[in-house]
Image (cartoon, rainbow, N blue to C red):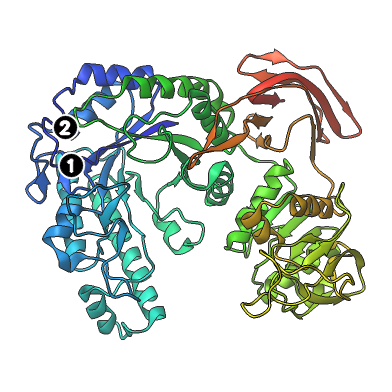
């Protein structure tokens, strides 16, 4: 599904709102760009409504029911039109109702995003919003607005609530009174967090309940609730929209791990990028059309639908250049997305979530190594995998420990690091080394001397094979004791405890290598981690002549009996404060080997339908791709 999230946060200082809206032209633009769904606004962050409202305030310079006209135009294009309602940011409501402000637990001050009000007539760059707390009077107001929208419009296509989970606690008067009624202490942060969660879940249940009174199966999404580290909110979403603007935050390696995580729930999910050069609300900002094509192909390769953020000009006319770029990307997506429907990642390696930054670092390494992977957590079946990675900070229950021991006893391989270890795996943790930053001695390529770990090791004991050693610094760096500009040099003599050890089917990194790599991006650390992997894990897919920025995704359709191999290549570059894709080099003679112990009927390139010669020998499928650029989809039947 090809979606557009059409922002319309529009100042009351702008006149003639929607003056150039033309329903037929709007419909044609949506249809020509092959848009399947476009989210449109009932109420924006400025606090204004775009339909006749008795509860809110219509934008003062809007003379007609823009929302209904947009919905009709989108439906005429054969697309869906979910309705957007702002929740956490609404300037008009914040100005009129200071008692609705979200109050920070620690500062006891209103929570602001971007520049702090009061709003004065001085130059402003970026956002300036006051966050609201949907408890008490504001919750009742949101419920009433939802009913009004449901009564005026057909909400079958869904409702999108925005800015729902900014902080983890609030101590506004409504929240403090509610905590006391529950026997909770407003001065205790854990109690405040508990109440916050209780009330957000209650809010989601109640608002969804209202929507479903009018349309039983209408999709309802609460933006901010698709957070990997907020699982308490996940059951209350009918689907997931994963907002990851790679140019502005997270880069091009964040969305994949989130997609893999939310795919586990078995609900519809889509990635959300933007048409903007940088971030939301950038009028006149454009993304390279091939960059957007890459992003759409990337989403498809992970089994996600795709959503592209746009912002409608106050005149109400869709931007011609924007939909030319979007149409170019969606045209390609339209030809290949059928090969992603009802598919699942086909892999023999899993990343066990620690719910820390280590997960992101681990995902980055796996992608650099061009490994397809699954996400697993507590209670998930790991028996189908040949290897499980436990990044840095995993917490184990007794049952987890038992399952992991059984896994290794049955031949499964474990790659683990830092705190993600327990005695039963044959490696005993003694303590943290106490160093601030230490060094690793392990010959990798041209590096033969100790290299900086960008972290520090844990001291362990085992009878395993030592593959790398720790070199401690002469001393920890303080204001009184320091050496040079950056860090203390290493002692020439290595420590007695190892940096990397292999014990049976367990490989253990003594450092939090995944967290350190996520922060540092160190070349030496990257090569070190890859060398460790190679000591214990044999790749399912081997690709030659695909550079490190190349991404490999391998999915299987049980229903239709095919595998889909996605190869993507576009090296990101930093220009100014933006991470972007600009160059799309042509790759030649890419060689593919896949472990597939099955009879293969055909190997084809899609969407061109070109047959690719292949060989199957000893459970290995081999073929060559003479040339590829940006994205190559290979269908194996």
**Label 1 neighbour load within 10 Å: few <14, some 14-19, many 20+:** some
Residue 195 drawn at (x, y percent) = 34, 74
Q: Position of residue 309 (x, y in %)?
A: 38, 36
- Residue 419 in the image: x percent, y percent? 70, 71
**Residue placed under numbered mark 1 in the picture:** 11
Q: How many marks?
A: 2
Left or right: residue 196 versus residue 457 is: left
Q: Quadrant of the C terminus?
A: top right
Label 2 near label 1: C-beta < 8 Å? no
**Quadrant housing residue 448:** bottom right
Discs 1/2, front: 1
Rendered view: 217 above or below 412: above
Q: Secondary structure at mark 2?
A: helix
Please report the residue visible at 35 percent of the width from the left and 44 percent of the height from the top.
219
Q: Report if residue 167 is visible in the image.
A: yes
Quarter location, residue 194: bottom left
Q: Determine whether 79 is above or below 167 in the image.
A: above
Mark 1 or mark 2: which comes first in sequence? 1
For the point 28% across and 75% down, the residue is 108
Q: Residue at x 65, y 74 (%)?
A: 397
Of 443 and 28, nearer the camera is 443
> Residue 25 — which label?
none
Residue name at image x 52 percent, y 21 percent: 332
- Can you identify the residue that label 2 sits on? 66
Q: Kindly report the distance in space between the C-alpha atoms of the residues bearing marks 1 and 2.
A: 16 Å
């Amino acid at each position: 599904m090809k979606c557009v999230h059409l922002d319309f946060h529009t100042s009351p200082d702008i006149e003639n709102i929607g003056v150039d809206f033309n329903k037929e032209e709007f419909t044609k633009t949506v249809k020509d760009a092959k848009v399947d769904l476009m989210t449109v606004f009932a109420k924006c962050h400025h606090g204004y409504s775009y339909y006749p409202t008795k509860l809110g305030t219509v934008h003062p310079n809007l003379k007609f029911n823009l929302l209904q006209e947009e919905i009709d135009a989108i439906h005429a294009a054969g697309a869906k039109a979910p309705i957007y309602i702002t929740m956490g940011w609404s300037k008009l409501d914040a100005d009129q109702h200071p008692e609705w402000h979200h109050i920070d637990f620690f500062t006891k001050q209103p929570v602001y995003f971007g520049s702090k009000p009061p709003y004065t007539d001085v130059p402003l760059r970026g956002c300036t919003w006051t966050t609201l707390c949907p408890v008490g009077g504001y919750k009742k107001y949101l419920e009433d607005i939802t009913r009004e929208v449901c009564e005026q419009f057909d909400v079958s296509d869904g409702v999108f609530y925005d800015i729902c989970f900014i902080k983890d606690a609030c101590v506004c008067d409504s929240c403090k009174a509610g905590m006391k009624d529950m026997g909770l202490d407003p001065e205790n942060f854990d109690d405040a967090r508990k109440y916050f969660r209780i009330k957000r879940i209650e809010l989601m249940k109640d608002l969804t309940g209202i929507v479903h009174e009018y349309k039983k199966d209408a999709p309802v999404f609460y933006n901010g609730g698709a957070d990997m580290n907020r699982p308490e909110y996940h059951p209350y979403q009918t689907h997931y929209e994963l907002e990851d603007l790679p140019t502005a935050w997270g880069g091009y390696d964040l969305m994949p791990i989130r997609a893999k995580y939310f795919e586990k729930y078995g609900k519809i999910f889509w990635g959300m990028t933007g048409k903007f050069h940088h971030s939301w609300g950038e009028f006149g900002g454009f993304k390279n059309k091939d960059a957007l094509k890459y992003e759409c192909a990337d989403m498809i390769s992970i089994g996600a639908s795709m959503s592209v953020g746009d912002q409608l000009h106050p005149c109400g006319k869709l931007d011609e250049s924007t939909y030319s770029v979007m149409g170019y990307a969606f045209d390609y997506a339209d030809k290949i997305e059928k090969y992603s429907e009802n598919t699942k990642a086909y892999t023999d390696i899993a990343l066990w979530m620690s719910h820390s930054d280590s997960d992101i670092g681990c995902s980055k390494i796996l992608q650099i190594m061009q490994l397809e992977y699954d996400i697993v957590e507590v209670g998930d079946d790991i028996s189908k995998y040949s290897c499980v990675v436990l990044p840095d900070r995993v917490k184990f229950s007794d049952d987890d420990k038992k399952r992991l021991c059984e896994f290794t006893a049955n031949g499964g391989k474990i790659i683990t690091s830092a705190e993600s270890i327990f005695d039963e795996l044959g490696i005993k943790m003694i303590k943290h080394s106490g160093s601030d930053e230490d060094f690793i001695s392990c010959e990798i390529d041209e590096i033969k001397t100790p290299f900086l770990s960008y972290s520090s090791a844990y001291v362990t004991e085992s009878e395993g094979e030592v593959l790398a050693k720790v070199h401690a610094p002469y001393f920890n760096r303080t204001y009184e004791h320091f050496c040079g500009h950056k860090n203390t040099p290493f002692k020439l003599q290595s420590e007695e405890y190892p940096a990397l050890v292999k014990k049976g089917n367990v490989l253990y990194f003594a450092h939090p290598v995944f967290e350190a790599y996520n922060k540092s991006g160190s070349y030496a650390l990257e090569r070190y981690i890859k060398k460790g992997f190679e000591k214990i894990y044999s790749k399912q897919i081997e690709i030659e002549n695909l550079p490190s920025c190349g991404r490999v995704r391998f999915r299987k359709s049980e229903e239709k009996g095919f595998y889909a191999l996605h190869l993507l290549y576009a090296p990101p570059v930093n220009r100014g404060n933006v991470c972007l894709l600009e160059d799309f080099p042509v790759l030649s003679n890419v060689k593919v080997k896949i472990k597939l112990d099955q009879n293969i009927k055909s190997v084809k390139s899609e969407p061109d339908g070109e047959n690719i010669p292949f060989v199957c020998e000893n459970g290995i499928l081999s073929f060559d791709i003479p040339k590829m650029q940006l994205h190559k989809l290979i269908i194996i039947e």
